[in-house]
Image: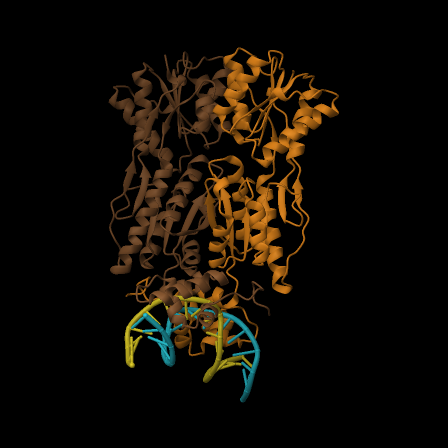
Chain colours: A brown, B orange, C yellow, D cyan
Amino acid sequence: MPARNSLKRLTIRDVAKVAGVSTQTVSRVINNHPDVAADTLTRVQTVIKDLGYAPDILARSLIRGRSHTLGIVAFGLEFYGPSRVLTGIERQAAELGYSISLNLVHRPELADAKTLLASLQARRVDGVIWAIPEIGDNRARAREISTAAALPLVFVNGDPTVVGAPLIGIDNLAIGRLATEHLLALGARQVGVVAGPNDWWEAQQRLAGWRQALTAGGLSVDETLVAVGDWGAESGRLAGQSLLERHPKLDAIFAGNDQMALGVMYAAHALGRRIPDDLAVVGVDNIPEAALFWPPLTSMRQRLREAGAQAVRLVDSLIGESDDSPGAQVVSPTLLQPELIVRTSTRGV
Amino acid sequence: MPARNSLKRLTIRDVAKVAGVSTQTVSRVINNHPDVAADTLTRVQTVIKDLGYAPDILARSLIRGRSHTLGIVAFGLEFYGPSRVLTGIERQAAELGYSISLNLVHRPELADAKTLLASLQARRVDGVIWAIPEIGDNRARAREISTAAALPLVFVNGDPTVVGAPLIGIDNLAIGRLATEHLLALGARQVGVVAGPNDWWEAQQRLAGWRQALTAGGLSVDETLVAVGDWGAESGRLAGQSLLERHPKLDAIFAGNDQMALGVMYAAHALGRRIPDDLAVVGVDNIPEAALFWPPLTSMRQRLREAGAQAVRLVDSLIGESDDSPGAQVVSPTLLQPELIVRTSTRGV
DNA sequence: CTGAAAGCGCTTACAG
DNA sequence: CTGAAAGCGCTTACAG
């Protein structure tokens, strides 16, 4: 059977032969080892350049026990949040010299943590970033398995209260609270919510933030003001329409993301409600298009790219530590704070 | 120096020892080799399961000369198109047993094909999918280098006329033509364009399609009806506003993507133009939100996920061929056809 | 049906 | 400063 890349791959031996040195010396040159005579160095470097030699990363990884690859378990890139996080991960990883092994999970509730991690470990990733939504017990399992296998693993988003689980997330409670406080400050008296799916941690937290703000503002919490969507715009329209029909006095809606907010505004237009005069609307994510919705949408900005980048730095430091002293590290979770971006959809309630 | 994953990685030798066979036999079991006695087979399988052994992919790849990894060179996941393509790639790759090495390029015009491909090849990827926009001479260089290195490479999108370059793309000329024909069929007499950046192949093609449809419809091509954006919504607003102010009789606009179409509609609202009565608007991509824009946006659907999936199947077949008979293969490019999705923004011009 | 030997391409101690 | 030897974890012919 012929070798894969037909043109007979160049090895360290070829370089050694041409340069008239041992493979060991070539290895020293490749790895910037100091103990190489100046003229030997230049000679070997010239040969490497002339031949166009590049060391085989696989062989090196095998021997060093480090692949300089990060396993990324991610979800639905069609969505804004996940793709932002991934962008941040990839960029920071590249800067730190890691390459990325991407594993997309399409149904997080079905994701099998064991199989996923086993396959990543078989590929000898140095660490894992687990960035799929927290649904069911996947995370607990992933945590167990990675600890048992001494595989550095960092979570992005999700429940930060799991003891000792390294996690970079966004303060979703603050998202719900700040958005609702903003609406109350504008004079809204009846604030509805279009929440994300119940089984999403993020959705629960944002809802809890809404309750918190109402209570703090001296208002009672009316659970009939909560409608649930699936993060998609059409679900936002349905939920918004239902809320507006059931509660004629509703004067504000907090939507769990900008897509659902778009749907809410659609429903409001269709019912002849003016935004923001009759109804104020706040979304979450601050997607680039939000500024050009009609009217421009107030939204909660999350630093998702930053979260991805921090996750990489964290897993990198865990990898470094496990090189020195194997064993589980305890790291307290980091929550990034959201920021309110005010636009026309909440001006002048 | 302690080994990376502290708990001393299990090897084929450990399994062999416990099962009381040679490593060779264990290898046969792992690889479903037929020549293994039934009882030996079950014994070894039991040991593998009990120990939780999984073969080291790196070592296997080193010896077989195949890593079962695909190098993906992709771009700006914040955008809808690229992330859809990547989703299609990842899913098909997983089905065919490939893992994905993701390399994002943030400025395609600066992408250095040589460095990128060298690093992918050093990691022994079996093939490459080049999915960054065609800007400058990157593609020509990538094609050269990959051919010289006998590295299977498939392009996604871009100019299909490069002789022999394996490519899966979308018929962008058809996008521009069909969108414009639709507007003309509705009775539009003056159709403006908000095009994507000039240096993007896709933008040029869509523009060419617009010209083609006008000419075919017996109308003259007025180049002052072309404004250029950067694919972002805000640029669409600026371009749309400028077109509407300069051409009071404009009755339709073809926008190069849905984000820019959103900006165009914003500009139209701001200027008091009713959509579609005064101005019909068509976008491209058919993003999920388009159906809930105000009004719902007519758009050109592209099968981007399908393009990604086909690219994987194509590179897989090239990899298979190069195993048998090394040498460049000539493959004719595939162009997927777009589809017009009609919504309110073009009904009743 | 099974095992001893050689080797994928590199690096790591160990001598000198 | 440099090289001969051993080995990372696996697979591939080659015997038997």
| Residue at (67% x, 17% y) in the render | B188
Asked whether B60 or A105 is in front, the reply is B60
Image-quadrant location for residue B3: bottom left
Q: Quadrant of the C terminus of chain B?
A: top right
Residue A269: image x %, image y %?
Answer: 49, 16
Residue B108: image x %, image y %?
Answer: 50, 41
Residue B252: image x %, image y %?
Answer: 62, 18
- In this rendering, would C15 be left or right of A26? left
Can you see residue A293?
A: yes
B67 over B214 or under it: above or below: below
**Residue at the front extreme?**
A39
| Residue at (60% x, 16% y) in the render | B279
B219 over B300 or under it: above or below: above
Image-quadrant location for residue B316: bottom right
Residue A54: image x %, image y %?
Answer: 46, 61
Q: Quadrant of the N terminus of chain B?
A: bottom left
Asked whether A255 or A125 is in front, the reply is A125
Asked whether A133 or B301 is in front, the reply is B301
Can you see residue B53?
A: no
Asked whether D13 or A76 is in front, the reply is D13
- In this rendering, would A230 be left or right of B170? left
Q: Tell me how many marks there are.
A: 0
| Residue at (66% x, 44% y) in the render | B334
